[in-house]
Image: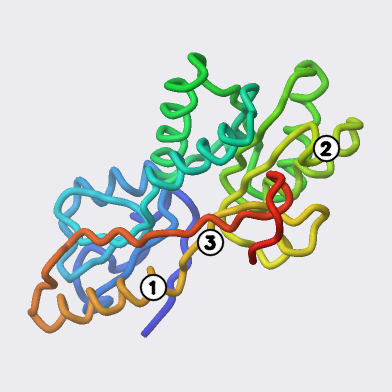
Amino acid sequence: VNVEMFHAGRLHQISGLSDGHRCNGAIITNTIDVDDQFLAATKLPFPVVLLGRRIPGYASVSLKSEMLGRKAAEILLENGRRQLAVLQPAMLTQATRSRLSAFITKVEQVVGLPPMMITADSLIERSGCLAMQRFLDFQPRLEGLFAVSDGLAIGAYHAIKKSGRKIPTDVAVVGVGDNPASHYIDPPLTCFENAEGAQHLAAAEMLINLVHGSPPENLIVEVPTTALLRESTGHSRAG
């Protein structure tokens, strides 16, 4: 068993990936569009399970991204929030794009307008804070924020509070990932668990079946994720 790291967009540069001599099977994750295009155009000569994305011809395990995005919108809308925004990184993955699309669609159905879009340079907290600061400097009306990762949400907290707004009184916030820090920031962050353990177990079992020539019953597995309702959306602590 070997863990091979690669820079985003450079999956194709991994030595020996395409000739079948490097490994007997692989679980591939954290790809961006360029990597996904490479996989779609290349038939790797060993069993592969993709984690967090779907590409025709490959087995995959992912969260129910559309459900996650729709539920995030429902949490904010049911809380009476109508002026909504999304905090996203500049570089999106297939899974992130899917959850954002579902969030936007649900908001448009209820409010009649899409949410405002805020783009951060990366997924780290500092980027989330800076992007949020820039947005709040010219957009005084904001009632709810969906951050595509807890890191971005934590950064946004600082910018929201620095602007004089209160969470959740003025701005309700929903994140994704259940970062350990999400329990301890003030107020605790409503988010979705990342269900990493369930995804990894399903991917490993699927790959073992493929390597041994016993195809799994389903080559596409979607793992459900749970919303953890906390004080950042006005709920009492639940996890």
Marks 3 and 1 sit apart, C-alpha to C-alpha, by: 14 Å
How dense is the environment of label 1, judged by Cα within 10 Å: few (below 14), some, or many (20 and up)?
some
Q: For this rendering, which residue is in front, 155 or 186?
A: 186
Residue corresponding to mark 3 = 193
Between label 3 and label 1, give the one nearer the viewer. 3
The three-letter amino acid code for the residue at tag 3 is Glu
Q: Label 1: which residue?
A: 200
Residue 229 in the image: state x and y as whole percent.
62, 54
Residue 178 percent location from the top left of the image: 61, 61
Q: Residue 134: which quarter of the image?
A: top right
Determine which residue is flagged by label 2. Answer: 159
Q: Which one is nearer the viewer's eye here, 111 or 136?
A: 111
Give the spatial CA distance, label 1 vs label 2. Answer: 34 Å
Task: Identify whether 90 is placed above or below 17.
Answer: above
Residue at 17% across / 70% down in the picture?
A: 46
Q: Secondary structure at mark 2?
A: helix
Badge 3 density bin: few <14, some 14–19, many ≥20, Cα 10 Å:
some
Mark linked to residue 210 = none
